[in-house]
Every structure is written in structure tokens, then in C-alpha cells.
Image: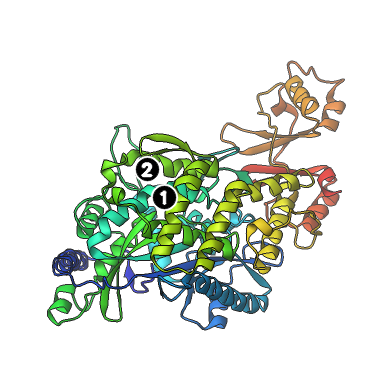
Amino acid sequence: MGEKLLHEKTSLDDKREFVRHLLDDVHALEYLLENGLFEDDVVRIGAEQEICLVDSNFQPAPVNMELLDMLGDDHFTTELASYNIELNLDPLAFTGECLSKTESLLKSNMAVVRKKAAMLKTAPLLAGILPTIGKREVGQDFLTPIPRYFALNNRLKSDKGGDFSLKIRGADEFFLDHDTVMFEACNTSFQLHLQIPSKDFIASYNWAQAISGPVLSVSCNSPLLMGRELWKETRIALFQQSLDTRKSSYALVDQSPRVGFGEQWETGTLADIFKRSISTHNILLTKDIATGSLEQIGAGEAPGLDALRLHNGTVYRWNRPCYGVGGGKPHLRIENRYIPAGPSIPDQVANFAFWIGLMAGRPAKFDDMASQMDFKAAKSNFIKAARYGKESLFSWCGELMPAKKLLRNHLLPIAHLGLQKRGISDADREHYLGIIEKRLSGSSPDQWQIRNYRKLLSETKTGPALKALTRAMIENQTTGKSLQEWPEITSTALGEQGMQIKDLMSTRLIKAAPEDFLNMAEALMQWNDIHHLPIENKNGELVGLLSWSMLEDLRDSYSFSTTTVGEVMIENPVSVSPETTLEEVRRLIDTHQIGCLPVCSQGVLIGILSKRDLS
């Protein structure tokens, strides 16, 4: 989505012209493939680093435009959310010390970001999902103010024809309807690029699909979303659902998602992959194209395939086939999009080393994946990895195998051989694949987060726990050490500076309805040791409040078994939003002489804060 001049609404003539260019691009690609015109005599690697920005209170900091101006470097660019930026590394030849060079480039660039961000009282963080991101930060107000992002958001909403539904189940559950695509911005990744010889593209792509589950299983780093423990790599479910424009129906109809793994092993050529993609995914955006691809070929130039690349950029495969032009020569790449950002730069490069080592070391028997493995097994392995990480049980070539066994006994040896085949230095190979090996016997990134988060929750509430986790991640990343060297989190002390009600409110709510009887309300308060009971109507709206002191006052005058809550409750109680400061909460409690405040978002009760929570 690097294009700046895009159109979400076009005239019939504009669309007709874009479609003409799109079809011509497919023909041009076929011409390049048939005539062997690709740069196939060199293999390069590249990467895109997505970065979160957080303020001094460890909340998302919407300052990407200001920071990019300060950086003044074309290697950095915007992302969908105003609290994210992206770093694009220059490609390196896949040989020698390219892995340690990648680590060095990432560290030097992150040091520059850290220095510039500090001037904005902001810090960069590498995380699959920023722990402190909240419902407010996925609103349209946090969309980066660039037309192409608004165009994408509006077109996807239009295609959906309603709100996006998020339903993710893990140790906790996350059910929410949302009216923008901004939940996609919760996901930050470390996207890997590998140049592929044109004649080997299909075999390489299918192998990339097959190894996706195992590679992801040991790379998971996104187990939390808004304080909920969900999948080991929650990004996988969240990204698909946040951009899912498919419509529900009473009929059972097959529909291809815009974010997905695919439906079959690929056959034919790269042109056939794109033909299938165009056949199943409508055109979201168009652009003006000055010179068509066939004209460029006629003039002896490498065609840009601008229309095809734009369409391909709006189909979010976890392994994305890519066409590009560098130095006047066309080339093909596979973009690995499922690896999360973080937990550290060395860990990310280890993930990179494992993936490209496997890609380079592919055994000959896997040149034809269909003869070795059913596609549904590979797809199922990918979902298992996202759910369960290195605790997954995979189906591999007809055999059920624990992830640790598959990786240690089968895939790591292939990765070692692949890196040796490409001439990677022994020091780099042993160092980075050694990090992967240590994860198998020690903690994986998702396990470190969950273990420390649960410990923090035993000492404090959700908000402060998430902030303490975020602070520890930032501090550990600045050391340059891999996760295996990170200490456990020992301090939760954050102070009240910048605290908001959402940081301290209780979200595990016990509620009653207006038609409930007082004896039921009394029992609910007794059983759950609470002194305030919010009252909701059938639409889930807060309509009243009942307190234990009220029950004591009513006991001699009312029959608890025949009087309903609605007859005696406080109607339309004073409430606040989750962003309210603690100072304002204390003022309201003192002014109204009340013991608690319900917390509402868009009329829906999401929490409650009592005097006890403020002590």
C-alpha cells in the first residue's frame, strides 16, 4: 500500500482503463516468464520492520508523521495507524554475513528512531501486538492522515456492508463488533523477503506454504489483545477478521477471504497464481497509469506491472508472491508476512535465518509438495501453530508429530544445510539457529509474555500490569539481548502519573436486570463480595445502579422476594468513560457522595470503579 495516488471511487471509464492495464499486466508477466527475462542469477534477502510508538505512559503515541519528518529518511514510511511506522531495509545478497549485517542495520536504525522519538517523549517498541493498545486507539481518529488509508478503510467497509465482527477464543474470549479496519493496525510484523528464481517459483512457493506452521510455531509473540489471553499468535486471527469483507448468508457459499493461507497447492506459473487471485478477489482500489506494461516491453524496458501490483497489495496472503524491478531488471520474491515483530532484534533475525535456511535447503522430494503432503494438512498446521505455538501437534507427511520433535529432528537440520549451501558464515548460522534451538528447550516469546503477565496480574490490575509488561519489553529491547537472556519482571511500580480509569476499573462484571427481584440482587452481592450492582436492560444499556447500603435501608420496608430491582434502583447513575482521569473520578465521587462509578463506552457498560479501587 505504498501508492499515494489511489482512487476508491472511480467512473466507469476509469475502472475500464484500470482493468485493461490489469489484464495487460498478466499478459506481460506471461511474456517475461516464457522468455526467461527475470534476474535469476542472484538471490537477495530483504525485510520490512514495523514499529510501535508509545508515550511516556506506555500508551500508543499517534506521532508517526512528526517522527518521520524528524527522521528525514526514505527508508522509513507510514503505516495504517498513526502510532506505527515501518522501516524498509535495502536488500542484501543471500550469502556470507548477510544475517549479522541485517541485525546491525536493524540495530543502527532503531537507535536513530529511539533518539528522535525521545524528543517527542516517545519510545519505539517491537511487539506483535502492543499490550497497552485499547478500544480508543483502534478508532478512526488514529488513522494516519493520508488519503490512501482512508480510501482503503472506506472501500473495505463498503464491501463489508456493515460492521466487522471479531470473535477470538483462547484462554479468554474476545467478542467485539467494530466499524473500521483499524484493528488491523494492532498487528505489527517483521516481513521477510526472499528472491526466487522464476523457474523454481511454484515449487518454492508450495514449500514456503508447507513450512509456515512449523516456522510460526516457534516464532509466536502476540498472545495478548487488550488484556485477553487469546492465541499464541493472535495476529493471525485478528488480521483475517479485521479485514474480512465476506458476507454471512443463509446459504453455504464458498468465499475467499482477503487475508488467508490459500486453498490449494499452486500449479502452473506465477501468472496462474495471479489469475486465480484476480478471479476470487474484486478490485478495491485503482490508480492512474501513464504507460502500460506492454508498451514498456515494446520499448525494451522492464514493465512495472503497476495495476497487478496494486491488486496484489490488497490481497493479504500470509505468503505473498511478489513482482518487482530493481536495477532495471524484473525479479520475483516470496514475502513472508506471518512473522511478528519482536521480541528482540536478535530473535527476529533468528526467525529470518530459520526461514531462509529452510527455503534454501528444501530437499528434492519436496519439489512436488502434492506428492508428499495434503494441502489441508499444511493449512491446518498453520492454524494450530497460531493457536498453540510450539505446543502444537503437526501432521507432517502423513505422520503426527509434536512441534518440538519436527523442528529439532527434521527442520533445523534442513535449515543448517540450507544456510551452508548459500555460503552463510558458520558463526552466523550457529548463532541464529542456536537461538531457535534454545527456544525449543526454554521459553518462547509468547510464553515469556504470558508468564510475566499472569505474575503481574496477581499483584495489580489489568491496566498497570499491561503497562509494566510494555515497559519491561522496551527496557529489554534496548539491551540488544535475545529473549533467552531477558530477566523476569519484578517491579510493577508505575505511580499514578497519567493513570486513567480504564487502568484500575474492574471488568469482570456482575450485573442484574430491572426485572430481577431484590433477593436475587442481594444474593449476587453477597456471593461475589461486591457492594455495587450495575443494572442493564435487554439491550445491554446501563439503566441503573443498586448498592448494598440501599438494600440495608430498604430491608424493613420492602419484600425482597416480590420487589423488583427496577422499582428501587438509582436511575441514570453518574457514569464516566474509560479515558477519564483519576483526578476527575475522585472529584465526581466527592461531589455526588457516591461509592462507585460505572464506566461506559458508547452507552455500553464495560467496567466499574469503586472507592476501594482508588485506595
Horizontal side of 42 relative to 522 (left or right) equals left
Which residue is drawn at the image coordinates 50% and 72% (left, top)?
102
Query: Tags 1 and 2 in contact by the CB under 8 Å rule?
Result: yes
Horizontal side of 488 relative to 404 (left or right) equals right
User: Where's residue 426, x and y in %?
Assistant: 50, 66
Which residue is drawn at the image coordinates 75% and 22% (left, top)?
518
Q: Is residue 464 visible?
A: yes
Q: State whether residue 391 is above or below residue 456.
A: above
Which quadrant is the N terminus positioned in? bottom left
- Mark 1 = which residue? 212
* Front residue of 433 and 253: 433
User: Where's residue 354, x and y in %?
Assistant: 47, 57
Q: Callout 2: 10 Å neighbours few (<14), some, many (20+)? A: many
Q: CA distance from mark 1 to mark 2?
A: 8 Å
User: Where's residue 280, x and y in %?
Assistant: 25, 50
Q: Quadrant of residue 344?
A: bottom right
Q: Is residue 225 visible?
A: no
Horizontal side of 562 relative to 259 (left or right) equals right
* Front residue of 29 and 138: 29
Q: Which mark is residue 378?
A: 2
Q: Amino acid at mark 1?
A: Ser
Horizontal side of 59 relative to 365 (left or right) equals right
Count of all numbered marks drawn on residues in the image: 2
* Front residue of 230 and 445: 445
User: Where's residue 60, x and y in %?
Assistant: 62, 63
* Front residue of 113 and 462: 113
Q: Quadrant of residue 51?
A: bottom right
